[in-house]
């Protein structure tokens, strides 16, 4: 069996039917195998970065493994930003790169390049992959492919890279194996202070004990809880116990926007006012499940975060837990385990309680006394609801937040899309603050990497993962990063609704320059080293239906244009250059006291609750 035929069949058996990449001499064997397999399809981007981001969008929207490929040299190097995105956001993606024939290597140490379009992509990718390897012998592909796939999809998920010299690609696999055991691949279990299952049981016990002594708990949910069924179990518990939930930006669409338990996403700079106030200033217990609590979430003054709250952190990544939130780790307990196991344990205990009630017996439950307690934090939930309602009113009265109101109107018109990919910039903030996501409608972000140019190709990948219409929201700066992928959208007639917020500026940096650089808008504004094209005209040149309108026309005119989501279309919205993302935490301020500041009487009332 040809090596590339084996690779494609292996991945196809794992559920990967769509491959994203760009053709080239040194990857041609792989692409040929994809084409010849009746169960797989190759989708060609117009820049390898677009293929990498498409794979990320596929993994995010489909909550499963994805694959992207590229030829050697510049093709492989162009994947790096997408590889980094997958690494920081824990997305399982298998990256495959072409390479020189092994017999072309000279063996001369220090030689800058072995041959045309050769590059050491393995060394380049290692810092942003869970595993990266070059195949030097045909028979190694079986173990290495099984190993790479297992690593990508276990523990904290992430990308892997396999570099494939041309002569290896066209070689033979004599004994194809599609499901090897970890020990057969030379893998050993990741080391933890205690076993993962034992740590999960300990964490569940600690959470029950903490809840027994808490009056104001909050569940903080991150991207580390990626299984939908597990999330639903958690939501069931939260509803039963009346505990408010706050999320990371990446996980903001886990709950519908109007769910009574949804109290927004935490953000050191641009998070929801009410999320920041509840978590940072009002709660006495934060139950943190698969959320990193990085400075982007809790602010740069880490030890000032939630000073009056006990913190319980559950994370599969032990390195995340090495960063203490409270100084000296006081009132903080960390458990290195899978958050899904902890949630299942909590749900099992709750079910035992319910079963005992149903049969009305004196059944002994073999857990601690705290496990059988029925928690009810209704009064605390009422306080959080008051905070949320009051601070939404403050934000709704802020004139500078007209882009947020526009995003809300657009989101209502996009209610039937399966996923919305959002790029990086002010529009990202407006979107996670104000998009009205529906149940099971995903918002996709480039979180840790924060890569401009992400949204359009990610939306393409999301469509192939869901098979349903999708959308993307971009700024004029971000959209121009991968604007060439409009041809991909048109070529395959993809049902993607593209929205470009054109403020003729790199708005987030322009805001920074206004506050800290004496209003010198270098390389961020029209006439100062930056400009934007006519996006509607560009889309029409690609053969895509498009329209351009002013921001104040969106609420009235956009819904009619956006109504038909089965075909590609682009909406350009022209805005004033001086746009701002509010609320925003001023440097040095606590994250629950953002600009523009809350009216004093409102602030004092809420802080006294």
Image (cartoon, rainbow, N blue to C red):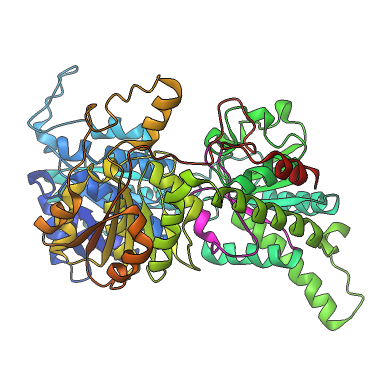
Up the image or down, 446 lies above or below 469; here it is above
Q: Residue at coordinates 26% horizontally, 73% vertically from top-left?
A: 566
Range of residues picked out in magenta: 242-270
Depth check: give the residue in front, 182 or 424. 424
Depth check: give the residue in front, 483 or 475. 475
Quarter of the image with the N terminus is: bottom left
Up the image or down, 44 lies above or below 492; here it is above
Q: Position of residue 130 (x, y in %)?
A: 40, 40
Q: Residue at coordinates 90% horizontally, 79% vertically from top-left?
A: 361
Residue sticking out furthest to the bottom: 359
Depth check: give the residue in front, 332 or 200. 332
Q: Quadrant of residue 15?
A: bottom left
Residue 247 sits inside the magenta stretch: yes
Q: Position of residue 12 (x, y in %)?
A: 28, 64
Q: Position of residue 210 (x, y in %)?
A: 80, 49
In the rendered view, does 374 fall on the left or right side of 101? Answer: right
Overall secondary structure of the magenta section? loop
In the rendered view, does 492 fall on the left or right side of 280? Answer: left
Q: Quadrant of residue 496?
A: bottom left
Q: Residue at coordinates 46% horizontally, 57% vertically from top-left?
A: 435
Residue 4 sits inside the magenta stretch: no
Depth check: give the residue in front, 79 or 348. 79
């Amino acid at each position: 069996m040809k090596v590339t035929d084996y690779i494609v069949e292996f991945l196809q058996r794992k559920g990967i039917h769509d491959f994203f990449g760009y053709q080239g001499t040194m990857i041609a064997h792989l692409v040929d195998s994809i084409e010849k397999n009746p169960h797989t399809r190759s989708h060609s981007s117009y820049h390898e970065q677009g293929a990498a981001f498409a794979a990320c969008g596929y993994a995010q929207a489909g909550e499963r493994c994805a694959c992207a490929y590229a030829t050697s040299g510049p093709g492989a190097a162009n994947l790096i930003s997408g590889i980094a995105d997958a690494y920081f956001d824990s997305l399982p993606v298998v990256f495959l790169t072409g390479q020189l024939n092994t017999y072309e290597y000279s063996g001369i140490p220090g030689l800058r390049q072995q041959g045309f379009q050769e590059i050491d992509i393995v060394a380049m990718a290692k810092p942003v992959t869970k595993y990266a390897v070059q195949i030097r012998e045909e028979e190694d592909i079986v173990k290495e492919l099984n190993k790479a796939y297992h690593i990508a999809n276990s523990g904290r998920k992430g990308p892997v890279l396999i570099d494939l010299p041309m002569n290896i690609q066209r070689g033979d696999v004599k004994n194809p194996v599609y499901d090897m055991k970890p020990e057969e691949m030379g893998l050993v279990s990741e080391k933890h202070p205690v076993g993962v299952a034992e740590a999960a049981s300990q964490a569940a016990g600690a959470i029950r004990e903490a809840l027994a002594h808490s009056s104001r708990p909050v569940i903080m949910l991150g991207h580390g809880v990626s299984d939908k069924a597990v999330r639903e179990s958690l939501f069931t518990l939260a509803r039963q116990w009346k505990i408010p939930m706050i999320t990371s930006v990446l996980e903001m669409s886990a709950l519908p926007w109007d769910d009574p338990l949804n109290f927004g996403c935490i953000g050191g700079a641009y998070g929801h006012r009410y999320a920041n106030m509840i978590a940072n200033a009002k709660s006495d217990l934060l139950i943190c499940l698969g959320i990193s609590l990085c400075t982007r979430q809790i602010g740069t003054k880490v030890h000032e975060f939630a000073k009056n709250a006990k913190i319980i952190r559950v994370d599969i990544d032990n390195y995340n837990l090495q960063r203490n939130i409270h100084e000296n780790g006081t009132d903080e307990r960390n458990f290195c385990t899978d958050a899904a196991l902890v949630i299942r344990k909590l749900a099992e205990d709750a079910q035992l309680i319910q079963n005992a009630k149903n049969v009305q017996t004196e059944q002994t439950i073999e857990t601690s006394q705290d496990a059988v307690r029925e928690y009810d934090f209704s009064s605390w939930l009422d306080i959080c609801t008051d905070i949320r309602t009051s601070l939404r009113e403050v934000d709704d009265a802020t004139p500078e937040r007209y882009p947020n109101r526009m995003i809300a109107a657009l989101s209502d018109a996009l209610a039937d899309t399966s996923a919305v990919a959002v790029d990086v910039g002010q529009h990202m903030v407006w979107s996670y603050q104000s998009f009205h996501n529906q149940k099971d409608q995903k918002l996709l972000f480039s979180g840790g990497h924060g890569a401009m140019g992400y949204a359009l190709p990610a939306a393409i990948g999301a469509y192939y993962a869901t098979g349903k219409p999708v959308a993307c929201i971009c700024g004029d700066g971000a959209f121009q990063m991968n604007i060439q992928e409009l041809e991909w959208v048109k070529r395959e007639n993809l049902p993607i609704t593209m929205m470009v917020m054109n403020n003729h500026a790199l708005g987030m940096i322009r805001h920074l320059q206004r506050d800290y650089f004496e209003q010198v808008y270098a390389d961020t504004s029209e006439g100062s080293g930056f400009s934007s094209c006519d996006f509607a005209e560009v889309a029409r040149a690609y053969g895509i239906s498009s329209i351009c309108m002013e921001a104040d026309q969106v609420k009235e005119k956009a819904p009619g244009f956006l109504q038909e989501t089965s075909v590609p279309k682009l909406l350009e919205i022209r805005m004033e250059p001086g746009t701002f993302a509010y609320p925003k935490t001023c440097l040095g301020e606590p994250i629950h006291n953002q600009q523009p500041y809350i009216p004093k009487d409102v602030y004092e009332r809420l802080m006294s609750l």
